[in-house]
Image (cartoon, rainbow, N blue to C red):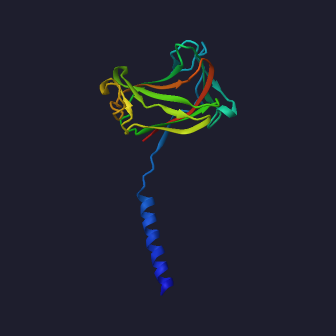
Amino acid sequence: MLRLAKLASLAVTGLFLVVAVAGTARAEQVVLADFEQLGVAADGSLPDWVVKEAGTKLALTSDPQLVSQGQRALQVFMTATKEQKRVMVQFLTRGANWSDLTGLYVDVYNPLEDSVDLIVAIQTANWDWKEYAAITLDPGWNRDVYIPFNKPFWKSAATGWAYTSVLVDKGEVNGLNFMFVVGDVGDYMFAIDNVRVEK
């Protein structure tokens, strides 16, 4: 009788597990940029990827240590000065409609022995700036860094530059920005790979 009771208990527990698994919807990830097919223009620039600060450049790399997935990644070089200790890398999304998207994933390599900050910002219609709270990048690979669109950790002019809002106005996204913030002057390098959006 005890054995039957245990079997019944397991059967019921198993049923609940199946229901729980069946009821859990997994979000779909769509690759936005993996750098596998990205070509280099005649002037050495990378289409749709730009940098804003002097002393900064971008390059494609196939160094296995700097590639998260596939064969290539984006390498970011920067020179930090007393006046400028951050670099911004911009991906032009050209009015993309992200209304149905719920988040962003990116893999980032930090070769330093210390942590650095990554700031992700999205520019919507009229190039309005929406910035997510700083993310700490540990030394080495930081895979699946997640930036949710539906959590109140975004700031903009509309919030008085306080991190109190979800990401709004996703119907027209013109730019996706990655900013690396360092503590000291000097030359730095980081790698970005496997940029994905979540539906």
Q: Viewer-proximal residue, 91 or 135?
A: 135
Asked if residue 97 shows in the view, the reply is no
Q: Left of 124 or right of it: where is 65?
A: right
- Which residue is painted at 65% across and 27% down in the image? 61
How many marks the image carries: the answer is 0
The C terminus sits in image quarter? top left
x and y, in percent, of residue 26 in the image: 45, 50
x and y, in percent, of residue 165 in the image: 33, 34
Tell me which corner region of the image, top left, top right, bottom left or bottom right, holds residue 68: top right
Q: Is residue 193 above or below residue 199?
A: above
- Which residue is painted at 46% across and 29% down in the image? 120
x and y, in percent, of residue 33 in the image: 53, 31
Q: Left of 146 or right of it: where is 150?
A: left
Q: Viewer-proximal residue, 96 or 177?
A: 177
Asked if residue 179 shows in the view, the reply is yes
x and y, in percent, of residue 50 in the image: 52, 19
